[in-house]
């Protein structure tokens, strides 16, 4: 399984062209040990970082699940979701990303927060990565896939086949209807659907 080597700067991957342009180039950690610290968002038109207010709502919903959790950040981008969870007391975070610009920003953010001992980066597509996971491999998984292309639905369907995480949160367009069994919260044009295993 490919792991990002911090000694090298040669990430491979392809730009996710369906992502919506976003002007932000800096994000901030909302709470915890790194509260207020700024991190870099990947540059370019292919990037749609999760907004601070949506991320804060996401973390508020999962606040009791985060301490000491094994976290998976799919379609990680800048790593803001996984890094936020680490800031709030998660035990570890695995980041899955394939876009070269996102990988560069993710590497810089992990280094700037001195989080290398807590973070592992996988240079791979998210759907391919979760396809190899067994049930309960993680405690919490965040996913922020491109809004176009149906990856949010495919990810939820994979989880229903093999619940690879105890809690799965998927950000998606508020207009998209997700598979049954989840709880959806809407924030304007954005929605997050949460799935929880019964274990």
Image (cartoon, rainbow, N blue to C red):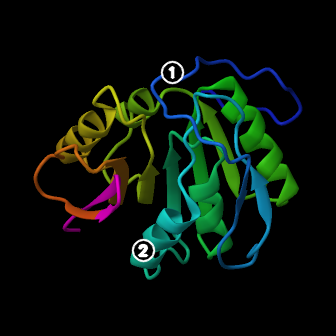
- For the C terminus, the image quarter is bottom left
Q: Between 39 and 158, which is closer to the camera in this rendering?
A: 39
Q: Residue at x 52, y 49 (%)?
A: 73
- Residue visible at 34% across and 29% down? 148
Residue 96 falls inside the magenta stretch: no
Q: Nearer the viewer, residue 60 or 9?
A: 60
| Magenta span of residues | 186-199
In magenta segment, residue 198? yes
Name the side, left or right, on which 54 lies relative to 134. right
Q: Residues within 10 Å of mark 2 (few under 14, many from 20)?
A: some
Residue drawn at (58%, 67%) of the image: 85
Q: Quadrant of residue 10?
A: top right
Residue 34, x across and y down, in percent: 76, 72
Which residue corresponds to mark 1?
17
Residue 78 at x, y = what percent? 66, 45
Residue 33, percent across and down?
74, 78
Locate the N terminus and report the quarter of the image it occupies: top right
Magenta stretch, main secondary structure class: strand
Label 1: which secondary element = loop
Q: Is residue 122 above or below residue 109?
A: above
Residue 105 position, x and y percent, is 75, 40
**Residue 52 appears left or right of 128:** right
The residue singled out by tag 2 in the image is: 62
Q: Secondary structure at mark 2?
A: loop
């Amino acid at each position: 399984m490919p792991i990002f080597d911090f000694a090298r700067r040669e990430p491979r991957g392809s730009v996710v062209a369906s992502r919506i342009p976003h002007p932000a180039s800096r994000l901030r950690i909302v709470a915890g040990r790194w509260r207020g610290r700024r991190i870099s968002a990947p540059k370019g038109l292919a990037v749609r970082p999760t907004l601070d207010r949506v991320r804060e709502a996401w973390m508020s919903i999962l606040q009791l699940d985060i301490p000491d959790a094994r976290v998976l950040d799919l379609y990680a981008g800048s790593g803001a979701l996984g890094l936020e969870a680490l800031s709030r007391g998660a035990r570890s975070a695995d980041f899955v990303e394939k876009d070269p610009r996102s990988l560069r920003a993710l590497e810089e953010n992990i280094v700037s927060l001195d989080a290398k001992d807590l973070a592992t980066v996988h240079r791979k597509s998210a759907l391919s990565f979760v396809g190899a996971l067994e049930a309960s491999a993680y405690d919490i998984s965040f996913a922020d896939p491109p809004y176009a292309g149906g990856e949010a639905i495919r990810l939820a369907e994979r989880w229903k086949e093999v619940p690879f995480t105890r809690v799965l949160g998927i950000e998606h367009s508020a207009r998209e209807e997700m598979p049954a069994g989840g709880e959806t919260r809407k924030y304007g044009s954005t929605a997050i659907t949460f799935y929880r295993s019964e274990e």
